[in-house]
Amino acid sequence: MKEGWARQQSARFLKSTTIDPRVRLVERFWEFTGQYPWQWTPAEGEAFIAHLRSGKTPIQMSTARTYEVIIGLFMEYLADSRYQWAQVCDERFGEVPQAVFHEGNSVLHTVEYEADPRRRPLTYDEVQALFDAADARPRKIRGQGRKGALAALRDAAVIKSVYAYGTRRTESSRLDLVDLRRNRKAPQFGTCGSLMVRYGKSQKGAPPKRRTVLMVPEMDWAVDVIQEWTTEIRPHFSPGRHPALWVTERVGRLSPRSINAAFVAAREDAGLDEDLDLHCLRHSYITHLTEFGYPARFVQEQAGHSHGATTAIYMGVSNEYRNKLLEVSMKARLGDDWT
């Protein structure tokens, strides 16, 4: 059954990174129940989710839904008459596979955003505090007589570029020098006029999504940061012909985990909320583009979202911005004497 289900997914050109975890989850469910798939009932599914919710690290609602969907897909495969598993099970065991999760016992998609509510955009002051802390780390390291000042300079540049282009950590890690490109409509930004993201987040089983992120005037301070990195600091790492934009001291590609660590170090030095993570810079980018006045469609394309509703989830515009919109609306309706 597992092998057949894996072949079915492979025939749809799903990646092994998608198929293998799905099969492992089915095996995990099988081990939990101690029963075979044709014996599974909704009661086993409910007990499985309840068990995962009661552990030392309870699963999140979104994770529970994912598990329910995956197990549901496996049961749909078994119940599909084209594969004859129901017929075989009925003949051999007098039982047939049935739906384990249904509308009455599964997580309903009732809200748009189910991630940690503590994840939010940084304010402009928090962004500045983060950058100031990142810039201070090289001096701090030199003052302590330790190695790592060059890496700290790189980390500061990485953090700033993540915010300036709104990239994810994996996207940032996979960038090459050639991905920095000119924008003929904005020649003043030089080679930083646009950024080709070739390893964007993909849907399950699909290849990476590509997009081009344009440098916006409000982020033009990042041009000097990136050019300083590529022309003055990066050569000190002796990268040779390595294509990566962000390289390590051992001339490797900077990993997503290392980019995370750079953010955490700067966040701690800045005294910011420990619940803020690297992805909050992407939330900040999307929010601030909106506050700068860019159209929703432009922001969506910059972020690489397929749907505008996804982009909206990332936004957390300030009260000041909303009050400005209110002021403009009131003046348009009532004139300058509305106050």
Image (spheres, helix red, strand yellow):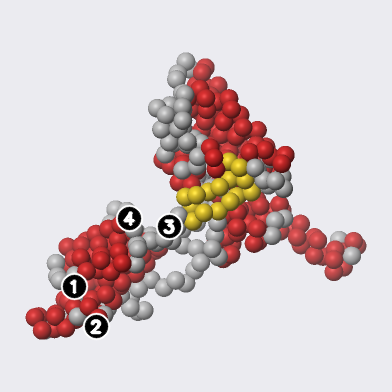
Three-letter amino acid code of the residue under disc 3: Pro
**Sequence-first disc among 1 and 4:** 4
Label 3 crowding class (10 Å Cα cut-off): few <14, some 14-19, many 20+? some
Indicate which disc residue 37 carries.
Answer: 1
Where disc 4 sits, the SS reads helix
Question: How far separated are the C-alphas under marks 4 and 2?
Answer: 28 Å
Q: Residues within 10 Å of mark 4 (few under 14, many from 20)?
A: few
- Looking at marks 1 and 2 on the same chain, the residue that comes earlier in the sequence is marked by 1
Q: Amino acid at mark 4?
A: Thr
| Residue to which mark 2 is pinned | 81
Q: Splitting the image into 4 quarters, where does residue 220 fall? A: top right
Residue at the spot of label 4: 17
- Asked if 241 appears above or below 80 in the picture, the reply is above
Q: Residue 174, relative to residue 250: is it above or below?
A: below
Reading the chain from its start, which is encountered first: label 1 or label 3? Answer: 1
Contact (Cβ within 8 Å) of mark 2 with mark 3: no
The reply, left or right, for residue 130 in relation to residue 95 is right
Instruction: State the image coordinates of residue 195 (x, y, percent, origin top left).
Output: 58, 45
Mark 1 residue element: helix
Circle 2 Cα neighbour tier, 10 Å, few/some/many (<14 / 14–19 / ≥20): few
Q: Nearer the viewer, mark 1 or mark 3?
A: 3
Q: Amino acid at mark 2?
A: Ser
Mark 3 highlights which residue?
A: 207
Tell me, yes or no, whether the two marked residues, 3 and 4, touch with CB atoms within 8 Å.
no
Q: Quadrant of residue 332?
A: bottom right
Q: Amino acid at mark 1?
A: Pro
**2 vs 3, front mark:** 3
**What residue is rendered at 9% in x and 80% in y?**
93
